[in-house]
Amino acid sequence: MRSICVFCGSSPGFRPVYAEAAARTGRILAEAGLSMVFGGSKVGLMGAAADGALAAGGEVFGVLPRALARKELEHTGLTRLEIVETMHQRKARMAELSDAFIALPGGAGTLEEVFEIWTWGQLAIHAKPTAFLNVEGYYDPLRTFIDHAVGEGFLREAHRDMLIFGEDPADLITALAAYQAPAQEKWLERFQL
């Protein structure tokens, strides 16, 4: 594992603990010799994570759509910042540059990014691990919902178990490095007549 993508909010949230966790995550990635890939913005948890990694001497790669760069949201102190045309290109490029993914607290954009990556894993488009940094229980309701989806037959246990939840960034990095993708059944075969 050489690089980890961090999905997180462009907002800092209401409590300082979120920005502190983001900065700590960036620092721990840098100290572990891992490059950080993220959405390229200087604001919110994105900026805090990037600043944490940079302050610890880490490499930080940002990918930002041109429309957001025009709004002067780009982080200008990165190792490298790529400007792309669309959000779709942003997500694809971030996935291409990353060996694993960690979702920090965030809103709809964070959830959309991490769920797409998780779905790609379910479909065996990639075999990269995905984790949630569960800062002070932020993702507890989501974890409960995912268990509910399994219980209702909309999600397989093996797919639920692809997700790693943890409260400490260093522990998540260790778990991501040890991840083994599940053996994939060709799901389309179940539907052939």
Image (cartoon, helix red, strand yellow):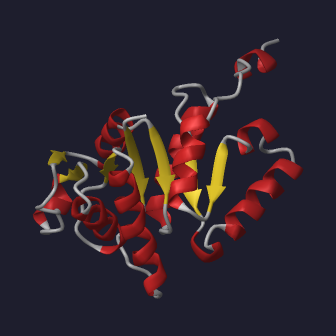
The residue shown at (79%, 52%) is 149
Query: In the rendered image of this protein, does residue 54 appear above or below residue 107?
Result: above
- Depth check: 118 or 173 in front? 173
Query: Which residue is rendered at x = 27% and y = 72% of the image?
Result: 43
Q: Position of residue 102 (x, y in %)?
A: 49, 52
Residue 59 horizontal/vertical position (percent) = 23, 48
Does residue 62 appear to the left or right of 133 in the view shown?
Answer: left
Q: Is residue 85 left or right of residue 158?
A: left
- Residue at image point 32% right, 36% down: 97
x and y, in percent, of residue 88 in the image: 34, 43
**Res. 86 visible in picture:** yes
Q: Is residue 182 left or right of residue 110?
A: right
Q: Is residue 50 above or below residue 15?
A: above
Q: Position of residue 6 (x, y in %)?
A: 41, 54
Q: Nearer the viewer, residue 42 or 172?
A: 172
Is the C terminus in the top left, top right, bottom left or bottom right quadrant? Answer: top right
Whether residue 87 is situated above or below residue 148 in the rendered picture: above
Q: Viewer-proximal residue, 112 or 140? A: 140
